[in-house]
Amino acid sequence: MKAITMGWILSLLLTASISNAGEFLVKYKNTAALNKMASMQTQAVGLQMKSINKTAHLVKVFIEKKNEARAIASLYADKNVEYVVTNFKIRSYTNPATITALKEQYSLAKVNAEAAWKRAGNKGSRKVILAVIDTGVDYNHPNLAPNTVPGFDFKDNDADPMDATGSANPGHGTHCAGIVGATGLIDGGVQGMSPEVSIMPLRFLGADGSGDLESAIKAIDYAIEKKVSVISASWGASVPPDTAKPLIEAVERADKAGIIFVTAAANDGKNNDKVNVYPANSGTPNMLTIAASNSTDAKPSWSNYGKGKVSIAAPGDEIISTLPGNKYENLSGTSMATPMVAGLVAFLKAQDATLTGAEIRSLMQVTGAKVQIETACNCRIDAFAAVDTLLSKKAWIVPAAASIAEKATVQLAMKNASGAVSFVSSNPAVATIDAAGLVTGLTQGTVTVKATDAAGTAVQSLDINVGAVASNPPPGGGGPGGGGGGECPLGDPALCQIMCQIMPTAPWCK
């Protein structure tokens, strides 16, 4: 098939500007307090309640600029309020377009997809539901229609998650859906990584490429309610960890529900170990954060990376996939690498529905092809190697790679072990490991761990980094500018300074 297509270098890894003027999300500690807030008159303190998310214990309020300091001080004075953050605006960004000829799907060849399907004897299963949380999906596209199931639109609050295109959205969600699970049954079309899958479109980004924190959280909670197996999230925001708390908590709820969360590292060309990007840096057990590779297995200049925060790489440069209106085009970004990995997660879950996020992440890392892209494994996904290891019931260490602070711990286990397992650290001066597999970091450095089961089968971990994440503290851990008490979550440093004068006990004032 020959055609001329627009190769947009696009990422819906999002920049956040605190421009959703006057809107804040208030987190209440319990349902009783939330219900009380819902029933009380808030006008007296300058608040207008807009909506309630009972699952997340969040209330969206509007506060006029002149009343912000007084109203937020009154909220923090309530012992039932856990935190207040801005309902930050999230926008997509694009780089200039380039004209390219329509290419073959090098990405599927690169990750050995055909061999993986042959090894498994299938191309996935429609029993596996994968939520594409994005700009919506053209569910009428002939290459996608058989694999789509009903979803929801949190942008317009209706049951129609159709992908509406615009100058800032060429059809990003539809493109991601095709990378996950285009059927390959249409002449001249494309195939996804899991051509048999159920794709649930959840729209929270509009035709202008814009969405907000509240809608993203609602989409995640909806996916949890509908019991999906995988979430593909090619978006994010550059905000402090305290501001991202509601988003991190939503990913944690997905983790508790057994949902694997695959997200993009970002397209800033930066090291995620040194910059704040969420949800990419959330670090929950169910999460895979994805960098992009190109046709030569090199890192495109725009892809983010990071030994501590980024799990693995996948093809994301000049990827051909579906667009609304029965079209196909090349797009590039970690946004494209993410659904490739999400599709592989769905394919592996079709072989073994019991696999956890940590197990699948580790499986992909220990079977990945080594590349010069800085991630936890310095590797790129290999679908055949992953499914062959899984179906052959070979052993691997979970987690296979980790970054911990000094004096911190991480629990390791040997998947598919036979009988008791013994563990050995390559450098006990850097990190020790006890008989149960608990690693304790002692001083900055890197170790590997060897695990041997009762049958004599031995496997080795990838790098366990100690002290490598010290420059990027966990949420609420007192990052730069927080004075040890957390970062300002209100989006306006001047407002936080005023708040510290009114209420010096606020967490960011300590």
Image (tube, rainbow, N blue to C red):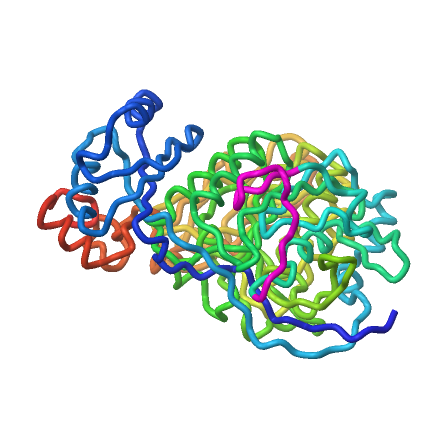
Q: Is residue 218 left or right of residue 10?
A: left
Closer-to-camera residue (214/109): 214
Q: Nearer the viewer, residue 423 or 86?
A: 86
Question: 329 or 127: which is nearer to us?
Answer: 329
356 or 482: which is nearer to us?
A: 482
Queried whether the magenta region covers residue 157, the answer comes back as yes
Residue 454 location (% of width, % of height): 66, 34
Which residue range is magenta in the image?
151-167
For the view shown, which residue lies furthest in the top direction? Answer: 32
> Horizontal placement of 167 versus 117: left or right?
left
Coordinates of residue 412 in the picture (x, y in percent): 52, 41
Q: Residue furthest bottom?
A: 99
Q: Is residue 450 visible?
A: no
Chief secondary structure of the magenta span? loop
Q: Relative to 186, is 63 on the left or the right? A: left
Q: Residue at x 75, y 49 (%)?
A: 181
Which image quadrant is residue 33 in?
Answer: top left
Image quarter of residue 353: top right
Q: Residue at x 32, y 44 (%)?
A: 24
For this orientation, the residue located farthest to the left is 501
Q: Is residue 315 above or below residue 141?
A: below
Q: Describe residue 145's horizontal placement relative to residue 475 as left or right.
A: right
Which quadrant holds the N terminus? bottom right
Farthest residue toward the right? 187
Is 163 colored magenta in this rendering? yes
Image spot of residue 188 (x, y percent): 88, 62
Q: Residue at x 55, y 31 (%)?
A: 257
Q: Is residue 49 visible?
A: yes
Q: Position of residue 340 (x, y in %)?
A: 68, 55
